[in-house]
Amino acid sequence: MAIKVLKFGGTSVADSTAMRKVFEIISSNREDKQIVVLSACAGITDKLLKLSETALSQDNEYLQILEKIENHHLKLIVELFRDSEKSASCIKSVNFLLQSLKKLIEGVKILEEITPKIKAEILSYGELLSTNIFYQYVLSRGLNSFLLDSREIIETDNYHLNAKPNFEKIQQNGEKLKKLLQNYPIVITQGFIGNWKKETTVLGRGGSDLSASLFGYSVNADEILIWTDVDGIMTTDPRLVPNAKVIEKITVDEVAELSFFGAKVLHPDTIKPALAKNIPVKVLNTFNPNGIGTTIYQNNGITFESKVSSMLLIEDCFYLRRQVTKDSRDFSYYLNLLKSNFEKLFKFSFNDNTILAIVKSPKGSDTLNLLEQEEFLNQKVDAIALFGLNIPNIDKEEKSKLDYITDRISEFLESKLFFVVSDYSAILLLQPNKGKEVIEFVHSILFD
Ligand code: ASP
Ligand code: MG
């Protein structure tokens, strides 16, 4: 029997409609053993953060926030359980959790102090609440399952709010989890939460993806499914290009590059533990469960024919050049200057006595003056970044498509060149504010 880890993010457990969808996904899979990892309901971790901050600053708003958290979960229960007896027993256990949260918060208020340890404890309540409710719902629907405290498996270091996993211990604890799976087809547990010597730790914001990867790692799972509210990783932003397509397979290196360029994809570091064990990770949509999704895998040195797999419009960029003469300062000076004055440095290179750089988002209001002082030619541009494996060796057919594109949109181009950024990306520069006009065309040539 295969072991699968299914991780559902905040929007997948946001309310009763979403939770029912999660239940349908789990109950329709009877062939596999399932480890179900849940996030907190959408927005709850933010509220818990705010709760601890307001209590610390003696702001009575904390009472309202506490009430909102309470109401959200009680409403969820009432909507989820049709049977009043079952909802009563769920309310009882949720109230117990809410009471202990309240005690912690009152402690913070009285002591006027919060330690990372206490804050981690407070933040963990979002996942404790969502898993508790979902577990009882699953039982009420007649599925045999076990509610596991993730702290039994996920051991970390003692950076309570941004804890790093202890892989060795997690691997050892995997034996416990495997035993549990012999007796239960479904184990439900929390994302985000870990422990250091019995103290609660959390893996950092958005840490549930990492949790899923770690649970997979601990038992050598056959597959990890990350269920979200989008169909997978897309060829480009579907809000800009309605015809954007789901990418069926992509390497983690391309995902890392996409994430570096600012795409909202899952953070590649979070799935590395799983990929290190060759466990495929798939991104799927809870609200469209029959979609194909995107499988992310590790490229073990195999070279693929190089095609563009996705693209991104990046606005608010600058194209910078500077002649370098004998008495110019050294490179590291210019490199550091750009790094410290822009949010992102996409490219920095040197050719024919010229420094060339592509940057995004100046950090300060006088950054552009500074560039002038430092004798950089600067042009505001829109950039289209293209991603793929082995981009410097793009295959012939793909290259001719790119040539066709640059010919057709030459009036919008700032430069005829594709700037190769790395093995996984290249940039095409357009005149400012022209990106939105041409992106659909570029996409249609590459992907339709
Ligand atoms: N609930 C946590 C957060 O909002 C962890 C997660 O959802 O991944 O950051
Ligand atoms: Mg998340």
Image (cartoon, grey):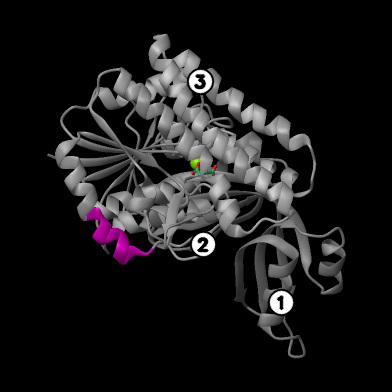
Magenta segment: does it hold 132? no
Pointer 3 with pointer 1, Cβ within 8 A: no
Is the C terminus in the top left, top right, bottom left or bottom right quadrant? top left
In the image, what residue occupies the spot 86% across and 58% down? 365
Q: How far apart are labels 1 and 2 at the CA level?
A: 20 Å
In the image, what residue occupies the spot 65% across and 36% down? 436
Indicate the secondary structure of the residue bearing disc 2.
strand
Q: Which residue is mark 3?
A: 76
Indicate the secondary structure of the residue bearing disc 1.
helix
Q: Amino acid at mark 1?
A: Tyr
The answer to which of marks 2 and 3 sits earlier in the sequence is 3
Q: How far apart are labels 2 and 3 at the CA level?
A: 50 Å
Instruction: Locate residue 246, reporting x and y percent.
Output: 40, 34
Q: Which residue is mark 1?
A: 334
| Magenta segment boundaries in residue numbering | 166-174
Q: Which residue is mark 2?
A: 420
Q: Is residue 214 above or below residue 288?
A: below
Q: How far apart are labels 3 and 1 at the CA level?
A: 55 Å
The answer to which of marks 3 and 1 sits earlier in the sequence is 3
Question: Which residue is nearer to you in this view: 97 or 173?
Answer: 97
The circle on residue 375 is none
- Please indicate, yes or no, whether residue 358 appears anywhere in the rendered image: yes
